[in-house]
Image (cartoon, rainbow, N blue to C red):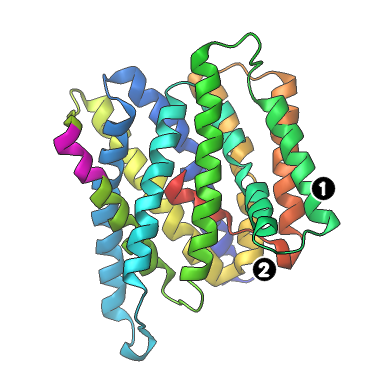
Amino acid sequence: MTRRERAGFIWIILAAAGFSVMPTMVKLTYLHSTFEPMDIAIWRFALAAPIMWAIVLLNGRSARSDTKQSLPTARLLFIGAIISAAVLAAFFALDRLPASTYIALLYAYPAMVALLSRLLGDAIRPRTWLALGLALIGVALTAPNLSTATDADAIGVALALLNAAIIAIYYMLTRRALDGVVDVSRASAVMMLGTLVIMLLLIPLRGLQFPQNPQTVLLLIGIGIFGTVLPVFGVNIAVQRIGAAQASLVSTVEPIMSMVISMLILGEMIFAMQWLGAALIVGSVIVLQLRPRNRIDLSIAHEAG
């Protein structure tokens, strides 16, 4: 393994770690503050978007002029607005579900992408049907027992699956919008700007809470930087060094990593059946990743998850 490849693997592991710890940081924010989901969502992008743009602009100064290209800005801003719906669904789900359950359900979105592709006319091969079956069984095993669950549990599961469905739609739109785009980091920053605009428009409608203690400040910074900026740029750098295929396969550790973090830090109890469900969902992702035609860019969840 070359030095460049080692650096690529380090970046993708850092990206996976940053995204994996974010659900736990959101749950801790709820514990240490009176913040509601919209407050955390607004602060997340109010912190992340300026940092992303600062990095993009600094990198742009050193880029050669002949490597720069125009971006479909209006389309990317629209996609950013869609991200806001996914983020709000995610944070409302985390307000109702254990972080471990949420992250496992979130990773049903690659199977949803395959299903959407079929609805749009693409042929589904046997391998894809296998992935869909694994994902459905995994979701059924991972979700709480809805026959004995509270209304909050049922709503939380619905919101987590809604988040996964929005991310699947977001993926389909982004794949077409970024076709031929080289500067993915700048495109990600434009989409994040679109998300930030929607979040800022929420402030006059419902107000915005400010952090009241150092723990909340640190958690918000962690969500903005380590849970958002680091995963997005880490994946982009890793793809340049080890390729999209290997980067996506390494990213499949995120659900398991996130569940372990929530168990260790939050003390969440994860039953054997839920571990099995999470393993089946991860297995469905790996099945899709093994075939180039089906491969899903898992970094897509880092902005919308």
Q: Tell me which residue sits at (26%, 70%) in the image.
A: 58
Q: Tell me which residue sits at (22%, 27%) in the image.
A: 214
Q: Is residue 52 left or right of residue 162?
A: left
Q: Amino acid at mark 1?
A: Leu
The crowd level at tag 2 (other Cα within 10 Å; few <14, some 14-19, many 20+) is: few
Q: Tell me which residue sits at (63%, 19%) in the image.
A: 144
Q: Which residue is mark 2?
A: 1
Q: Which is more foreground, mark 2 or mark 1? A: 1
Q: Tell me which residue sits at (49%, 23%) in the image.
A: 265
Which disc, if any, is residue 164? none
- Residue that protrudes farthest toward the right in the picture: 126
Q: Secondary structure at mark 2?
A: loop
Q: Is residue 45 left or right of residue 153?
A: left
Residue 214 covered by magenta stretch? no
The crowd level at tag 1 (other Cα within 10 Å; few <14, some 14-19, many 20+) is: some
Q: Amino acid at mark 2?
A: Met
Which disc, if any, is residue 130? 1
- Which residues make up the magenta segment? 199-205
Q: Position of residue 49 (x, y in %)?
A: 28, 54
Q: Position of residue 75 (x, y in %)?
A: 37, 66
Q: Position of residue 43 (x, y in %)?
A: 26, 39
